[in-house]
Each structure stands twice: as C-alpha cells, then as structure tokens.
Amino acid sequence: MLIFAIDDEENMLYLLHQAIAKAQPDAQIMDFGDDDELIGAITEQKKIPDVVFSDIELRGGVNGLELAVRIKNLSPDTKIIFVTGYPQYAADAFRMHANGYILKPADPKRIREELDYLNLSHPRPELHEKLYARCFGSFQVFWHGEPLLFKRSRTRELFAFLIDREGAVCSGEEIIAAMWEDDSKLKAAKQYLRALTQDLRNTLSSIGMEAVFIRKHNQWAIRKDLLDCDYYRLLDGETDAVNAYRGDYMEQYTWSELTAARLHFRAV
C-alpha cells in the first residue's frame, strides 16, 4: 500500500508519518511539505497513492480541499483523508465526499479505523495504463493527468458517443442520426464521419492507445476494459462515483439527455 502524507508543518508531518507507520506497518509512506511536490510525484514519478492523508490549511493559500480535487482528477481511485486541527472544515470535507476526517493530533488508532473502512483490496492500474474519460459535467478525456487534445471537437464527440454506448457496436447511421440532426446534410455527414474516424484513430495512436477504438466496415465501438470512466464506475455501483455524480452528464451534447434521464431515475 502506498500512502502519501502532506503537511506544511515539519513536526506535524513527522507525527503524522509515525502514526501512519504504526497503524499500517507494511505501508510505503511518502511525505510532502507542499502540494507541488505531491502532484509532481503523481505526474512525473508516476506514483499512484492508495490513500492521501492531507492537512487542509497549507502555506501559500493552498487549500487541502482544492488539492483533493486535483488529486482525484489525476487518480480517481485514490482515497482522501483529511487531518486537521480545524473542526469547522468537517462539513466542507464531507460535502466533497472525502473518505475520512481526522482531527490533529492524529493517532494510530483513528488512522487504523479509517483504513479499515476503506476498500483497498483491489490494486488499481498504473497511471499510464488507461485513458480516463470524465462523463460527469462536461465530457473530457485525460492522459497522464492532462487533457487529451483533439484536432476537431467533433472527434471528441464521436469518442463520447461511443463511450455512452458502453462498448456496444454502433453503425454509421446510428452515429450520424445522433450527431447530425439535419437530414439534408446526410452525404456530407458520411464524409465527415470518415474524417473523424481517422482523426480519432490518429489521436489515440499518438499515445499508444489505438486499441481502445474499434472500427470494422460500417461499425464503430470502443473497448470498455481499456478505459477508466466515472460513468462506468457509477454503473458498477462504486461509492466514489455514486457520490461524485451531481446529475450532470456529458452536458455539452444533446444526444446524452436520454442517458442523463436514465441516471436520474436510477438515483431517485
């Protein structure tokens, strides 16, 4: 188990480290005095923590709640436990669905209780192994924690549509009917779809992830097993994804409204 501990007070960080070590003797613990070091460990060293124990008030105006969002964007499976001397932050921490909240000074017993509550039995893939598709809110794709850039916005929409179909095979007619509502431009749409297909293939090939996209003749699909996706996690009932969903799903696309409605009634 890899655990990150962050606190800008050296003595508090030392005490936190010792408490974690007593609570989880076999854990690898990495200490950080500021947020940039921690983020760098994820993005540059490719260290993916199972758990982050974070202070809330950090130097330089950095807020631990904001840092938690950055960590989650890079590593959605990482669990966040706040360790702070300010009980007034508890409401904010739980509002953002933190996995735990401990008041300073942290003691091994409380840390052990929080770790026992987490489900850490299944190892996660390394950061470089999968694309991360964020469907909640505005659709976006991330690679190594950075947004994956598409030459055409329609290429990203094509990828979004295939993700929405959960790996099901789609015909060109289905895709065109969803993405182009004007039937009078059907011929142009077919030509454009071919261009988008090539653009999507090139974009994924540039990062070595071309296997995610499948196209044979007039059929398109994606491989779900090669994607990390909040929508798929929600369908699987994962707690973090269920908590993160706020009723907004691929909000920039009108064709996504059917899935959004289905998710709404699922949540009711």
Image (cartoon, rainbow, N blue to C red):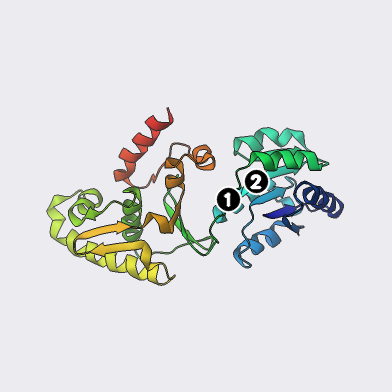
Relative placement, left or right, of 49 versus 24 is left
Relative placement, left or right, of 145 versus 92 is left
Q: How many marks?
A: 2
Mark 1 or 2, nearer chain start:
1
Q: Quadrant of the N terminus?
A: bottom right
Residue under the image location 75 percent in, 39 percent down: 102
Residue under the image location 63 percent in, 35 percent down: 94
Tag 2, which secondary structure?
Answer: strand
The answer, for residue 85, to whether it is visible in the render is no
Measured from the top left, where is residue 231 in percent x and y? 43, 45
Marks 1 and 2: CB-CB under 8 Å?
yes
Measured from the top left, where is residue 103 in percent x and y? 78, 38
Measured from the top left, where is residue 91 in percent x and y? 66, 32
Indicate the amino acid at tag 2.
Answer: Ile
Relative placement, left or right, of 148 versus 80 is left
Tag 1, which secondary structure?
Answer: helix
Rendering quarter of residue 113: top right
Residue placed farthest to the top in the image? 268
113 vs 150: above or below: above
Q: Name the residue under label 1.
A: 72
Report, in whole angstroms, how far the alpha carbon at label 1 lies from the one at label 2: 9 Å
Q: Mark 2 points at which residue?
A: 80
Q: In front: 224, or 268?
A: 224
76 vs 234: above or below: below
The answer, for residue 223, to whether it is visible in the render is yes
Measured from the top left, where is residue 143 in percent x and y? 49, 62
| Residue 253, numbered circle | none
